[in-house]
Image (tube, rainbow, N blue to C red):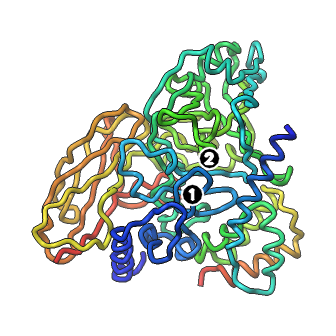
Amino acid sequence: MMKLVTCALLAASTAIADEGQVRLKDGPAKDLVVGRCAICHSLDYIPMNSPFLDRKGWEAEVDKMVKVMGAPITPEEAQKIVDYLATEYGKK
Amino acid sequence: MWNRRQFLIDLAKGFAAIGAGTLRPGIVLAAQAAAWRTPGLPSGTLDSSVLDALPGKRPLVKRTYRPANYEAPIEYLTDAFTRSDAFFVRYHLPNIPELSTAEWKLQVAGDSVERPLTVDWQSLTRDYEQVELAALCMCSGNRRGFSEPHVPGVQWGHGAMGNALWKGVRLKDVLARAGVRKDALEVVFDGAESPVLNTTPDFVKCLPMWKALDENTLLAFEMNGAPLPHWNGHPVRLVVPGWTATYWMKQIISIRVVPRPFDGFWMKSAYRIPKGKFPIIDRFISQESETTTPITEMVVSSLITNLRNGQAVRLGRRLEVKGIAWDGGYGIQTVEVSTDGGRIWRAAELGRDLGRFSWRQWSHAFKADRKGVQTVMAKATNRRGAGQTFDLIFNPAGYHNNVVQRIDLLVA
């Protein structure tokens, strides 16, 4: 299985090189969003799902990431992340 | 609804870009990008999508880099079989190992198995009868991006699907060798892809016993006459003809036959549709709840592949509208085309029948005889008499969008 793990890391690093092109909008919690969300997925998931979610919609997404996907995000961080997403990528 | 005039303009630009020649390998040009900027998708989706080539693939429409989610531009959906290097890519988890045939092994076990066994490449390709069939593989969420209102998820346009010739062995033959007990209820499948965190649910799916034992359900190792591409499940994937691609597990390494309903996020919470809203025949009863049911077979649908919204056409010109039509494995009976916005419908000519699980090509000749906007539409009906809908059947995950397409030509 070690071999599998090595290959997985290589494949992941290639994808990370491409996803480095994704640029999120500047905002107070941008670094936090990048630091937490990009652990598991590229950041294009955010602009792709915009701008049609309202605050409640983004809250549900962040909640799913924490409760279902096990994202290591504290409740205080989750609040900041939702604020950022609702402000920068929310339904106007 | 999007702004109609603006979308016609956008699309006209998009069509011009196609004429200029898109899809050159390795090249992403903003000016050409318009060709696949499908209207109706969220603006953030359009802005964050690019044409990008994964290793071994042609440039496809990148929706997300990691996990990799790429769809085929419509130009690739015109053929009877979709070329493997243009076949859509859809992953739920980001760590996707390169698996050689030498290291691949499939464990067949579970409480309802008599003799647990390990199948290696040699055994798979030597010990079982091999069969080949044509089948459409379509993501459950294909066209999710057109949902009104929009719903979260990968914002697919039309291209999260492809038709291919799959070669492999029957799942039922492998299960027979392991011996299935009388109490068997479901078959649970796991692939080699894995999450970053061990707190994230692994992507595991299951099938009801009857579908797993269907003679058309395959463990496939070839696609279009060649080994499966890495991004489409090399070396072995499940092929579940008629059902949406969520069940077509890639890089399959574990099969468990169990006597109880499998309890996992990707079955119990994801890939579910409201009960009774869609004309579905295949049920997955052991996974149903009071209000929802797992998605199963594909609904009847069609796609116009050679005309674009906003395309400029000279008055009086003779044209042909071409496309594809499909369903959940009953077979397409008719495709009807309207070239006057839905008043008169005429039967299209159907292409070769490649089997009931394949999509069916069709075409219809007509004249651009309406100055201004001439609306072309197509609707398919299957052998059970089921058809397409004119109004979206909204559901929270954006599945089963088979709304009849409208293509507005600008005739002058």
Q: Secondary structure at mark 2?
A: helix
Could you say which is closer to the camera, residue B39 or residue B222? Answer: B222
Quarter in which the N terminus of chain B is drawn: bottom left
Identify the residue shown where x is 50% and y is 44%: B84
Labels 2 & 1 near each other (Cβ < 8 A): yes
Identify the residue shown where x is 35% and y is 81%: B9
Quadrant in the rendering for residue B3: bottom left
Kindly identify which residue carries mark 1.
B70
Identify the residue shown where x is 62% and y is 35%: B237
* In the rendered image, the vertical position of residue B20 relative to residue B194, given as above or below: below
Identify the residue shown where x is 68% and y is 66%: A18
Chain label for disc 2: B
Would residue B64 be found to the left or right of residue B105 on screen?
Answer: left
Q: Which mark is residue B231?
A: 2
Chain label for disc 1: B
> Could you tell me residue B35's position as x and y percent?
41, 69
Of the residues under marks 2 and 1, which one precedes in the sequence? 1
> Could you tell me residue B277's position as x and y percent?
48, 50
> Could you tell me residue B342's position as x and y percent?
22, 61
* In the rendered image, the vertical position of residue B63 relative to residue B224, given as above or below: below
> Could you tell me residue B73's position as x and y percent?
45, 59
